[in-house]
Image (spheres, helix red, strand yellow):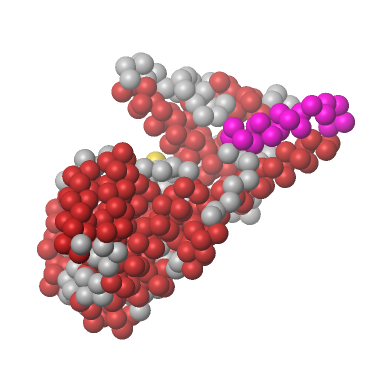
Amino acid sequence: MAEDKAALSAAAKERGNAFFAKKTKEGYEQALAAYKEAIAFDPEDKIFHGNCSACHIEIAKDVWDPIEKVTAYAQAFAAAQRCTELGPTWVKGFVRKATSEFELVQAREKWEDKKKRDEDFQTERRERKAKSAEKPAVDEDLDADFGDKFGFAEKVLDPEISSIAAAASFGACEATCREGLGLEPKNVQLRMLLQSLRDRGHPTDEESDRSVRDQEAAAPFKADGNAAFAKKNFKEAAEHYTKALTEDPFDHVFYSNRSACYAEEQDFEKALRDADKCIKLNPQFAKGFSRQALALYNLGRYPDAETAAQTGLDLDPASAPLQNLLKQAQVETKETPEVQALIHKFRQEKQQDQKMKQLMQGLNMGGNGNFQVFSPGQFGNSTGGLDGLLSGLGGGGGGFGGGGKASMSDDQIRQMARAMAGASASAPSGGYSSAATPAPPTPPVAEAGKPTAFAPKS
């Protein structure tokens, strides 16, 4: 009888492996069913539970609905947990457990964010409805249909899944990684998960990190990153620097170099995160402040960018990049906070216009630049001063000479921001006039959104 069960479980496992190899959603679902069949014949085999976890993880990747994603990752975590209980020395089980818990925490956060957005949306709709005395009562039914159609109808997690999701944490995920690394110190997946935890803001245990630090192993990844950066393969370079960090999370240069990559990819939130980490690891590294100032500038945080550049110059007064960053930031900090906010907003819209123009060219639609995210004319014609200013810039409210914001210079954006803020008639304390503000010499950012990232340190 036992031999029959062993044969049946082995056959089910083989079918599961064949289905899993298809690498399709249907294949993963079929594989999951086969592995569950194997468990029914032999519930004590750790591999069957680990394989079920792998199926749930792959299924979760294909799911867009937040509650379904939470459910899939929770099921993956539960299966992996059982796997490690049955096989406490099987490293792959710890990889599955740590991976599923890391993803479960992120999926749970997104689900909670969606619930909050849905609640805010529904509250806003109810408030608008309450203000309207003419809305017919029949709209109650339409409201229900609307909620169902667009995902605002209330959804709840299965109680068991909810309990698993609520208990998941980055701290527990780190503990699982440590346990697995205790069995296999050089496991790449577990080291990568630890770095992912750091990148998500979880402070991993420093003493434990130092115990697995391997500077020699990190060096080749750094060299590969520098080579990719030199070829302007910034995404690839960032991946190499991330691998270097998995081996040595205490090298500030790796964070500095990866910050430069993210800046080139216009992901300034990540660029700032890495610059901050670089500075934390080495507060005397002037280049770290240039990374930080560049990211802050492109995030519209001009006073903070000025402070960062000045701090860097206090460390390295001869740094040309920091000098240029300081001058560029000071051009903006002469403006009022309202004007600064508008300048950043218009620069973001300029980037969107430029991307759309490139897309149109790629689609062979002419790419004449007439597309624009925002037309100043949409704000109305209540002031002749604004229309006059826009006309003076070369095209009235319809796109500045047919180019939209994509063709506007920084000075034109600055003047439009002043006009929109009602500041064109008088200068702020720093002083400006309605004439174009001279651009600083050799600015570090030729155009907003197009950073000049300084080459990685060798």
Image x and y of residue 77, in percent: 38, 62
**In the depicted view, which residue is nearer to us: 170 or 15?**
15
Report the number of discs.
0
Seen from this angle, which residue lies furthest front? 1
Q: Residue at x 79, y 27 (%)?
A: 138
Image x and y of residue 331, in percent: 49, 50
Please give left or right for residue 363 compared with residue 303 in the image: left
Please give left or right for residue 143 compared with residue 249 in the image: right
Q: Residue at x 46, y 53 (%)?
A: 70
Image x and y of residue 9, in percent: 22, 56
**In the depicted view, which residue is nearer to us: 307 or 100?**
100
Q: Residue at x 44, y 34 (%)?
A: 352
The quarter of the picture where the N terminus appears is bottom left
Can I make out residue 251 in this image?
no
Relative to 378, say whether 53 is above or below.
below
> Residue 179 in magenta?
no
Please give left or right for residue 110 compared with residue 83 in the image: right
The quarter of the picture where the C terminus appears is bottom left
Image x and y of residue 319, in percent: 31, 63
Q: Residue at x 65, y 32 (%)?
A: 146
Relative to 347, say whether 263 is above or below.
below
Can I make out residue 200 in this image?
yes
**In the depicted view, which residue is nearer to us: 79 or 33?**
33
Relative to 124, say whether 149 is above or below.
above
User: Magenta region's main secondary structure?
Assistant: helix
> Residue 146 in magenta?
yes
Please give left or right for residue 165 compared with residue 387 in the image: left
Q: Which residues are magenta?
A: 132-150
Location of residue 392 by image quarter: top right
